[in-house]
Structures are given as C-alpha cells and as structure tokens.
Amino acid sequence: MAEQNIQGRPPGNGRRTVAIVVGVAFVASVTTLILALTASHGARQRDAAAITADGHDLHGVVSEWRAQVARTEAATNGEREAALDALKKQADAASAWQPRTPCGQEARERLRAVMDTRITSLTRTTPGTVQGELAVVDDALRSCAAQAGRDVPG
C-alpha cells in the first residue's frame, strides 16, 4: 500500500477526473440540444412566414386573374381574342413569379395548370367547369405546409 502512494498519486484522483470529464460531456450535450432546438424553432418560424408571404402573393395573382377572367367573359366577340391573349400573358407572368418556398412553387404550378384549363374552357363554344383558382392555391399551400418535415426519417 505504501508503494502506491510513493508514485505521487493521491487516492481517488482518477474518479475525480472521470467525474469532471462526464460532467463536461453532459454540459456539452445539453448545450448542443438547446442550440439544435433553437435553430429548429427559428427555421420553422421562417418557413411559416415565407409560406404566408407566398400565399399573399398568390392571392394577389388570383385576384388580378379573376378580374381579367370576368373582363374576358364579358367581352364581345371582337374583343374576345385580345382578352384571351391578355389572360395568356397573365398566366405566363404567374409562372415567372419566384416563390420563397417549395410549397409556394407547388401552389404556383397547380395554379398555372388551372389557369391553362380556364383559358381552354373560355376558348370553347360551351365552356366547361373549372376548379376555383383560389381553392387550388389554398389547398396546395395547406397540404404542403402540413407535410413539412415529414420526409425526415424518425
């Protein structure tokens, strides 16, 4: 027993070192967890704000679109071709809009499809029924936002 103390190690020093290392590792783990949760929360808030902004932009596009559709429907035969050309240009402008989020991109693509269907319907002698543009945008944004984060394996 006397020989162990001659080497200059007080008894229990190894346990203290292990306790300090474990304590530092625990603090580092907790700090990492807090930083990850904070970053995740911030990212969710930024995504929600961007989706809301995309929705407002697309609602504005739909409002202008509806006004142009009403003008086209009210146009006389001579004015109809020019009104349809204006609708086509407006649909092209909607396709050129740059969304902030993948949800906005999906909503833009669905809206463009409905716009093309509406244009086709208006060129026919007997127009068909077309799903409402605003409903398409809202549905796309809502379903996409609900799916956010579900592609990450858990």
Image (cartoon, rainbow, N blue to C red):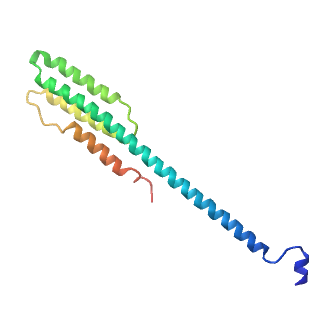
Percent position of residue 71, x then y: 15, 23
Vertical side of 43 occupied by 94: above or below: above
Residue 10 appears left or right of 53: right
Identified at 22% across, 20% down, the residue is 85
Residue 12 is left or right of residue 22, and the answer is: right
Q: Measuring 46% from the left and 47% from the top, which residue is drawn there?
A: 43
Q: How many marks?
A: 0
- In terms of depth relative to the viewer, which is nearer, 71 or 30? 30
Which sits in the foreground, 57 or 72? 57
Please give the name of the residue rendered at 40% of the width and 37% of the height, measured from the top-left corner: 100
Q: Is residue 116 above or below residue 46?
A: above
* Left or right: 97, with 122 as reference point: right
Does residue 46 sit above or below 112 in this rendering?
below
Rendered-image quadrant of the N terminus? bottom right
Quadrant of the image for the C terminus?
A: bottom left
**Residue 49 occupies which quadrant of the picture?**
top left
Residue situated furthest top in the rendering: 78
Tell which residue pokes out farthest to the bottom in this image: 1
